[in-house]
């Protein structure tokens, strides 16, 4: 495909190819000279209609390490504020000879809509509650790096599953790579038909931790809650917050992941987030190599 819109559209062979390519790029960016000339003829626009720290900066670094030309667009200080539409905005950017668009948007399906209405490669950097494909890829890359393989591993995704694009993309990615997936959270924050995706469902966080090899912990996404969901942040922390004492009670050492940003003291205590068991900053490091792989492979598909 010319686009990366979601993990749902990819085969396990596609995923393996991206992970293998990312491993090669990780070696490249660990060298004293981090850049390769692969995309020196390509111009990429990072078009963000929603806030981001990790995704935006790691796409920009990935592009620069592939020698692409890069422009950054944030809707909050743009002519979107004067009423310009999404398609008009992107078509105006493309008329300046831009080849690829990395887009984050709060509406599920916005990158899919764009891919049908403009002439450029579109990469989804997170669309509302729907998918965040490069996050799932960097999460699987990080599990493979830490545990040797994703296949056969038990991964519990814990938190606000209902509002999480990271959860959905991870479910698709982990299953296609042969992992067993559990979701865990308060019943009010689990989608009604989540079990139909073939995941285990657990309401008790201690049981989820006991079951898994890897816990991918998510934050409560208050910005996506149209109504006030139960539980409140304080109640969530009381019933689902993970601290070191809970990990010490387990009969094995599990790996702790979090896509960021962390609400310290809510879903994760600092004694877990900053512990030896946490690979949270490795996830962020791996994001650059994974995004280089995605950009390189899509550019080659042209
Ligand atoms: N993990 C993630 O998407 O973080 P940002 O929202 O900061 O990009």
Image: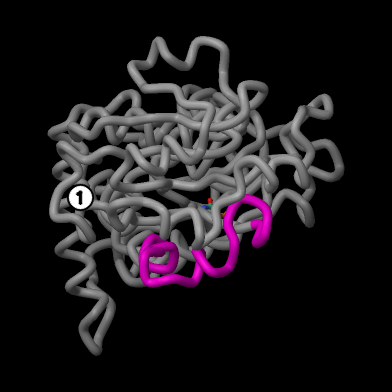
Majority SS type along the magenta span: loop
> Could you say which is closer to the camera, residue 242 or residue 182?
242
Image side of residue 148 versus residue 84, left or right: left
* Residue 29 in picture, x, y percent from top left: 26, 75
Q: Quadrant of the C terminus?
A: top left
Confirm whether the magenta stretch covers residue 273: yes
Label 1 sits on residue: 19
* Residue 162 in picture, x, y percent from top left: 60, 26
Instruction: Residue at 27%, 77% (x, y): give it.
Output: 35
Image side of residue 255 versus residue 160, left or right: left
Q: Quadrant of residue 248?
A: bottom left
Image side of residue 256 versus residue 188, left or right: left
The stretch in magenta equals 263-283
Instruction: Residue at 35%, 57% (x, y): give it.
Output: 42
Q: Quadrant of the N terminus?
A: top left
* Residue 166 in picture, x, y percent from top left: 48, 39
Relative to 235, residue 130 above or below: above
């Amino acid at each position: 495909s010319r686009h990366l819109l979601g993990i749902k559209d990819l085969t396990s062979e596609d995923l393996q190819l991206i992970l293998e390519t990312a491993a090669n790029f990780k070696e490249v960016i660990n060298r004293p000279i981090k850049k390769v000339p692969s995309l020196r003829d390509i111009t990429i626009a990072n078009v963000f209609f929603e806030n981001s720290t990790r995704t935006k900066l790691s796409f920009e670094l990935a592009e620069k390490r592939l020698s692409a030309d890069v422009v950054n667009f944030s809707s909050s200080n743009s002519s979107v504020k004067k009423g310009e539409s999404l398609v008009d905005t992107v078509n105006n950017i493309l008329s300046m000879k831009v080849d690829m668009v990395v887009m984050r948007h709060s509406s599920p399906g916005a990158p899919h809509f764009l891919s049908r209405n403009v002439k450029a490669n579109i990469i989804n950097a997170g669309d509302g509650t729907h998918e965040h494909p490069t996050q799932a890829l960097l999460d699987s890359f990080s599990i493979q790096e830490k545990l040797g393989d994703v296949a056969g591993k038990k991964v519990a995704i814990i938190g606000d599953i209902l509002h999480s694009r990271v959860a959905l993309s991870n479910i698709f990615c982990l299953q296609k790579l042969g992992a067993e997936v559990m979701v865990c959270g308060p019943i009010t924050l689990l989608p009604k038909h989540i079990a139909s995706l073939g995941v285990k469902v657990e309401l008790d966080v201690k049981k989820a931790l006991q079951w898994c090899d890897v816990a991918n912990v998510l934050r409560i996404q208050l910005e996506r809650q149209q109504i006030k969901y139960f539980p409140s942040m304080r109640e969530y922390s009381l019933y689902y917050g993970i601290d070191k004492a809970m990990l010490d009670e387990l009969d094995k050492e599990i790996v702790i992941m979090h896509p960021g940003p962390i609400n310290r003291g809510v879903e994760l205590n600092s004694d877990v987030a900053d512990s030896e068991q946490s690979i949270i900053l490795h996830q962020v490091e791996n994001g650059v190599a994974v995004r280089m792989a995605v950009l390189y492979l899509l550019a080659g598909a042209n």
